[in-house]
Image (tube, rainbow, N blue to C red):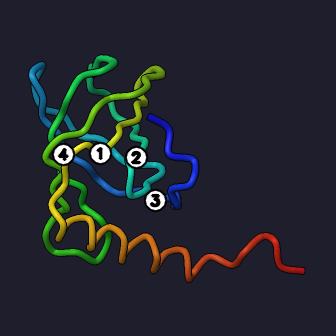
Amino acid sequence: MDHPRERRVVIKAPVSFEGKSGTGKGTTFNLSLGGCALEGGADVKMDATIKMNLHIPNEKKPVRVGRAKVIWTAGDDFGVEFLNMDQTGKARLQHYIEGVQKKVPSKNKS
């Protein structure tokens, strides 16, 4: 499912994941509260369900995503929708995204 209203940030952060077809590692290239896009050499299938650990910058512990669904694939890249994440993880992710957005100047300002 697309989340056009979700705030997205460009971020290069390591991710580890596991699913029925095995485990893998990748790097995010955009991130929102609703999901993320990853580059990685793993063989993931459309509609697969995976568990993820997002290693966001300046955080000691990864944000754990209990369940994410692969919603698109393109070569070695793929996108996931977060289906299950605990409230603490959501709060940490939201705090990180808001912090990044405050550092990036708006393109609409004159």
What's the CA distance linking mark 2 and mark 3? 10 Å
Instruction: Check contact, mark 1 vs mark 3: CB within 8 A.
Output: no
Mark linked to residue 36: 2
Q: Earlier in the sequence, mark 1 or mark 4?
A: 4
Q: Earlier in the sequence, mark 4 or mark 3?
A: 3
Instruction: Check contact, mark 1 vs mark 2: CB within 8 A.
Output: yes
Residue identified by numbered label 1: 82
Residue identified by numbered label 4: 52
What's the CA distance linking mark 1 and mark 3? 17 Å
Q: Secondary structure at mark 1?
A: strand
What's the CA distance linking mark 2 and mark 4? 11 Å
Indicate which label's residue lies in the foreground, 1 or 3.
1
Above or below for 10 versus 103: above
What's the CA distance linking mark 4 and mark 3? 16 Å
Answer left or right for 19 relative to 6. left
Q: Amino acid at mark 4?
A: Met
Residue identified by numbered label 3: 11
Badge 4: few (under 14), some or many (20 or more) residues near its Cα, within 10 Å? many
